[in-house]
Amino acid sequence: MSVRDALRSAPMVNDVPTLRLLRVGDGWDLVRTPAEMGFLALAHLRAIGAAIGPVLYDGPNARLYYAIQTGTSGNWSDLPVRHLSTNSWLVAPNLELIDDWFGGWCELPDDDTLTDANTLHAALQHPYIGASLEGASR
């Protein structure tokens, strides 16, 4: 089931119509990144023409969530990211909610497209991302 379809059928969070509770690990997993790093990787993925699955921006927590194929756990320990799978849940906005404070969907394909885990890993390790983050911390 695509993330878009899962959103349509997901239960509301505390009866708030704009927020849904999505179960992770059933057809897709998530990789959670710090927002700054995640946005740089997203720009890189767009620039190289990679297939990009759903990407959610969580504004209050300054994070991006990338949907990847379930079972592609790989090794994420070399990056400041977290792989979320079975027994994980995501509070996500519905299809329409996007605002400056909350965030929203940066990408939400109409089909079952997911971001390739290896391509995402390579993008997050790209030298310009590390250099940009180092330059910003100075």
Image (spheres, rainbow, N blue to C red):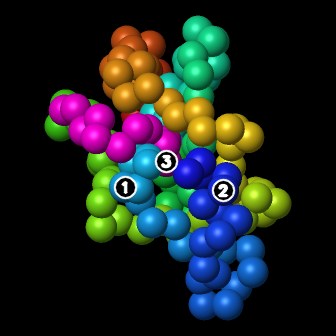
Q: Residues within 10 Å of mark 2 (few under 14, many from 20)?
A: few
Q: Does residue 66 show up magenta in the picture?
A: yes
Q: How far apart are marks 3 and 2 (CA)?
A: 17 Å
In the rendered view, does 61 fall on the left or right side of 73? right
Q: Which residue is identified by label 1? A: 25
Instruction: Determine if residue 128 is in view.
Output: yes
In the rendered view, does 137 fall on the left or right side of 99? left
Judge by depth and name the residue closer to the eye, 133 or 112: 112
Please say if 37 is above or below 120. Answer: below
Q: Which element is circle 3 on?
A: strand
Range covered by the magenta-colored residues: 65-75
In the rendered view, does 108 fall on the left or right side of 129? right
Q: Which element is circle 2 on?
A: helix
Q: Which residue is identified by label 2? A: 5
Q: How far apart are marks 1 and 2 (CA)?
A: 15 Å
Tell which circle, 1 or 3, labels the residue nearer the N-terminal end. 1
Tell which circle, 3 or 2, labels the residue nearer the N-terminal end. 2
Q: Distance between the residues labelled 1 and 3?
A: 14 Å
The quadrant of the image that shows the C terminus is top left
Residue at the far right in the pictured view: 96
Q: Which residue is identified by label 3? A: 65
Residue 121 lies in quadrant: top left
Marking on residue 6: none
Residue 59 lies, in percent from the top left, at 60, 57
Please say if 104 is above or below 129. Answer: below
